[in-house]
């Protein structure tokens, strides 16, 4: 049974064809090896309207639904999650502007984003605020018509890239409940007083993960997204749900890519006089890999469908992120085992999938956080 409509299948297939025809796995591989952002592909995607997909029609977008976005993320990630994040990751951040931005902010930031001229990384984590994201200590203090920012952010993917407008979670007030007093402010990455240092991380090589130091960074108060103190509502109440659907779909797409590559290798690699696919132990391994990937796809589609209909889905989103990330990790590890030494070199692509699989259970909320959310939602 296929749960997608003909229109949804056509959309997903068209994105797949674009990745194969106009981008190619070699380009994606080289960006990873060079730790270089895929600017050319990003601009091509913008011309095709990818960045407009979720933006409401009233703001100049296409007004598409979350399910269509999830299908796009799945198709984009066939040769790597990092590529999907580079092209489509900014879309879930841009939706914060669509939902909470002023007319000036939308014209200044959202319109150039849809044209492919800027990027929207999100910066939440700090040295002491990872899973405990409400523990943000970076301060934004009001000074007349400006805010002055001081502190340090960590694990921000894409902050150093050209035209990056960082949506940064900061503390504007100290309160007893640390979830209060948080705000989101738009920080252009060329603002004086901002120092951005790329990190040599295992994954996210082409998007580039960074740490950020803020030393009396001065920004107009008009850069505040939403009202002061609404940061927790914006990030925890809306942003993370969409982000986790997007990354879960990307993990599914990359898991399928890993299965495809491992299967092709097993059918071509000859040992002991026959293709290694003929050995039952490897056929069963591949069967398990495909089964897990299909299960991850279905659980992700369920979350995307509920979200697209505006229904409560906190538990289902956490399940999708948990299961899809752990599936990618398992499938890529098995792919490495099937390919043996050949899987250890960049040209095989499997080692890139494996690295991204290791990151998948940490970024965007750890597996432990997802299990906690699921357990909370199970209470009666």
Image (cartoon, helix red, strand yellow):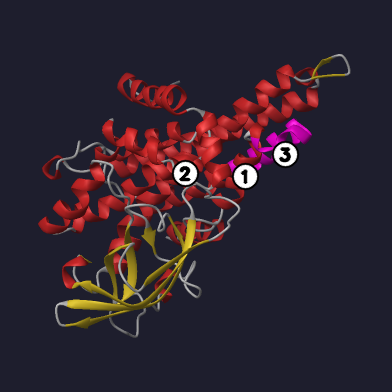
- State yes or no: residue 330 in magenta: yes
Q: Position of residue 83 (x, y in %)?
A: 47, 40
- The outermost residue toward the top is 273
91 left or right, relative to 143: right
Callout 2 environment at 10 Å: few (<14), some (14 to 19), or many (20+)?
A: many
Q: Is residue 29 left or right of residue 341?
A: left
Of labels 1 and 3, the one closer to you: 3
> Is 24 or 58 nearer to us in this picture?
24
* Residue 54 on image: x %, y %: 25, 41
Q: Which residue in the protein does label 3 denote?
A: 344
Mark number displayed over residue 248: 2
Q: Are marks 3 and 2 in contact (CB under 8 Å)?
A: no
Dot 1 falls on a residue whose secondary structure is helix
Rate crowding at label 1 as few (under 14), some (14 to 19) or many (20 or more) other CA atoms within 10 Å. Answer: many
Q: Cα distance, mark 1 to mark 3?
A: 16 Å
Q: Which mark is residue 329?
A: 1
In percent of the image, x 40 and y 72: which residue is there?
Answer: 134
In the image, which residues are magenta? 328-346
Which secondary structure, mark 2?
helix
Q: Which mark sits nearer the N-terminus, 3 or 2?
A: 2
């Amino acid at each position: 049974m296929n749960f997608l409509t003909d229109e949804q299948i056509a959309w997903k297939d068209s994105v797949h064809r674009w990745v194969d025809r106009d981008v190619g796995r070699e380009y994606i591989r080289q960006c990873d090896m060079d730790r270089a952002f895929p600017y050319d592909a990003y601009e091509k995607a913008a011309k095709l309207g990818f960045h407009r997909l979720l933006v409401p029609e009233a703001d100049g977008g296409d007004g598409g639904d979350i399910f269509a976005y999830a299908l796009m993320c799945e198709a984009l990630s066939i040769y790597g999650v990092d590529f999907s994040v580079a092209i489509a990751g900014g879309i879930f951040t841009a939706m914060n502007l669509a939902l909470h931005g002023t007319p000036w902010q939308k014209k200044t930031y959202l319109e150039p984003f849809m044209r492919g001229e800027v990027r929207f990384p999100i910066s939440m984590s700090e040295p002491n605020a990872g899973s405990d994201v409400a523990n943000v200590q970076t301060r934004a203090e009001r000074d007349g018509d400006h805010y002055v920012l001081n502190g340090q952010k960590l694990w921000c993917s894409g902050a150093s890239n050209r035209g990056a407008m960082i949506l940064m979670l900061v503390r504007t007030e100290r309160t007893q409940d640390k979830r209060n007093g948080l705000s989101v402010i738009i920080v252009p990455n060329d603002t004086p007083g901002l120092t951005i240092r790329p990190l040599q991380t295992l994954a996210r090589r082409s998007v580039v993960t960074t740490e950020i130091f803020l030393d009396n960074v001065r920004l107009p108060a008009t850069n505040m997204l939403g009202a002061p103190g609404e940061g927790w509502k914006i990030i925890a109440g809306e942003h993370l749900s969409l982000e986790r659907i997007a990354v879960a779909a990307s993990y599914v797409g990359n898991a399928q890519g890993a299965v495809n590559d491992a299967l092709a290798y097993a059918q071509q690699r000859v040992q002991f006089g026959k293709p290694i696919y003929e050995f039952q132990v490897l056929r069963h391994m591949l069967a398990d890999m495909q089964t897990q990937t299909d299960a991850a796809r279905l659980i992700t589609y369920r979350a995307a469908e509920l979200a697209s209909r505006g229904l409560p889905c906190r538990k289902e989103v956490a399940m999708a992120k948990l299961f899809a990330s752990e599936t990618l990790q398992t499938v890529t590890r098995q792919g490495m085992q099937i390919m043996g030494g050949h899987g250890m070199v960049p040209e095989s692509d499997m080692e890139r999938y494996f690295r991204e699989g290791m990151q998948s259970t940490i970024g965007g909320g750890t597996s432990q956080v997802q299990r906690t959310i699921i357990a909370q939602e199970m209470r009666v």
